Amino acid sequence: MTKSIESILAWLVMTVFAVAAGFIVWFLGATYSRHYAAKTWVEVPAAVRSFDIRTSRSRSTGSSMPTIQSRLSALYTYEFEGTSDTGDRVDFSFGSDNFSGARRSEQLAWLM
């Protein structure tokens, strides 16, 4: 390979890694900032209207075992400073996870 092709490929690889690193930094920063902002929230009573654990299966390439992922969903109402509102946020995670059932059991216990 010539020096110019090597140089272009090096820049291409560096750009891909820089974009991936930027995404990871953004993802971690967004998650941290949501958790940090929630520390200032005023705790108020809420009435849980409904809740459910939604599960799905996905099969990774090259894997013979499906991955079972679950996501907790809930609908609740609350009153803050004289205003009634409805919410559905249970946690700050994105998407589903395939962790043990302990985390979901803990979240369900909070809802009951």
Image (tube, rainbow, N blue to C red):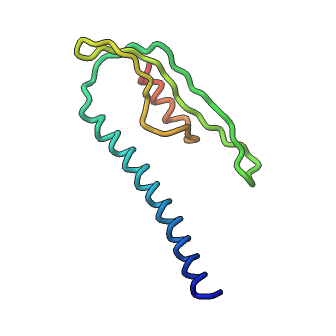
In the picture, measured across the screen, residue 111 lies left or right of residue 40, that is right
In the rendered image, residue 35, in percent from the top left (x then y), is placed at 34, 40
In the rendered image, residue 106, in percent from the top left (x then y), is placed at 46, 30
Number of numbered discs overlaid on the protein picture: 0
Which image quarter is the C terminus in?
Answer: top left
The quadrant in which residue 84 appears is top left
In the picture, measured across the screen, residue 14 lies left or right of residue 2, that is left
**Residue displayed at 49% across by 39% down:** 94
Q: 9 and 61: which one is in front? A: 9
Q: Which residue lies furthest to the right in this view?
A: 64
Q: In the rendered image of this protein, does residue 110 appear above or below residue 37?
A: above
In the rendered image, residue 7, in percent from the top left (x then y), is placed at 54, 81
**Residue displayed at 41% across by 21% down:** 87
Which image quarter is the N terminus in?
Answer: bottom right
**Residue displayed at 44% across by 58% down:** 22
Q: Which residue lies furthest to the bottom in this view?
A: 2
**Residue displayed at 58% across by 87% down:** 3
Q: In the rendered image of this protein, does residue 97 appear above or below residue 29?
A: above
Q: Residue furthest front?
A: 4
Q: 41 and 98: which one is in front? A: 41
Q: In the rendered image of this protein, does residue 71 appear above or below residue 17?
A: above
In the rendered image, residue 17, in percent from the top left (x then y), is placed at 51, 65
In the picture, measured across the screen, residue 88 lies left or right of residue 4, that is left
In the picture, measured across the screen, residue 85 lies left or right of residue 14, that is left
